[in-house]
Image (cartoon, rainbow, N blue to C red):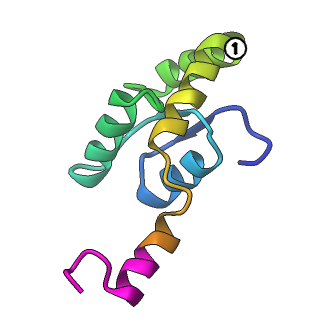
Amino acid sequence: MAVADVIVTKPGGLTTAEALAKKLPMVLIDPLPEQEELNAEFLERNGAAIQASDENTAVELVMDLLRNDNLRQRMVESIGKIRKPDAAREAAQHIIWGIGNGE
C-alpha cells in the first residue's frame, strides 16, 4: 500500500484501516452483508471511498482516480479527517488508566 495511489478492495476492517492509515483512496467492491456494507457506506459518505457495482465499474473508477489528481487529493484530504492513526494507543490508555469510567 505504501507505493499505491488507489486500492480496489472489499471493505473489510483490517484492509480499510490500513488504507486509512496510509491515506489511500479506495474503490470498494462486493461488500459482505452487514459490517462490510456499513463500512462501505461510512467510507463513501465521508469521501474516503467510492463504491463500484461491478468489476467494469471498478476499472472505470480507478482510471478516473488515476487521471484526476484533484479528485484523488480531495479523497486523501477526506481520509485525513476521519482516520485515527493513534486509535490503538488511545484505547490502551483508556484500558490501562480507566479513563472515561469515572475513575
Total numbered badges shown on the rendered structure: 1
Residue 82 is one of the magenta-drawn residues: no
Q: Which image quadrant for residue 37?
A: top left
Q: Position of residue 71 (x, y in %)?
A: 59, 14
Residue under the image location 60 percent in, 51 percent down: 21
Q: Which residue lies under the disc numbered 1?
A: 69
Looking at the picture, tell me which residue is in the foreground, 56 or 15.
15
Task: Please tell me whether residue 54 is drawn above or below residue 88 in the rendered image.
Answer: above
Residue 94 is one of the magenta-drawn residues: yes
Q: Is residue 71 left or right of residue 91?
A: right
Looking at the picture, tell me which residue is in the foreground, 4 or 99.
99
Q: Position of residue 60 (x, y in %)?
A: 56, 15
Residue under the image location 19 percent in, 81 percent down: 102
Q: Position of residue 62 (x, y in %)?
A: 61, 22
Task: Please tell me whether residue 60 is drawn above or below residue 15 in the rendered image.
Answer: above
Q: Bounds of the magenta span?
A: 91-103
Residue under the image location 38 percent in, 31 percent down: 46
Q: Amino acid at mark 1?
A: Asp
Task: Please tell me whether residue 35 is drawn above or below residue 88 in the rendered image.
Answer: above
| Secondary structure category for the residue under label 1 | helix
Looking at the picture, tell me which residue is in the foreground, 7 or 88.
88
Looking at the picture, tell me which residue is in the foreground, 43 or 9.
43
Q: Is residue 37 left or right of residue 66?
A: left
- Look at the image and tell me in which quarter the C terminus lies: bottom left
Q: Is residue 19 left or right of residue 102?
A: right
Residue under the image location 36 percent in, 84 percent down: 95
Q: Which image quadrant for residue 42?
A: top left
| Category of crowding for the residue at label 1, using alpha-carbon neighbours closer than 10 angstroms: few (below 14), some (14–19), many (at least 20) | few
The residue lying furthest to the front in this view is: 103
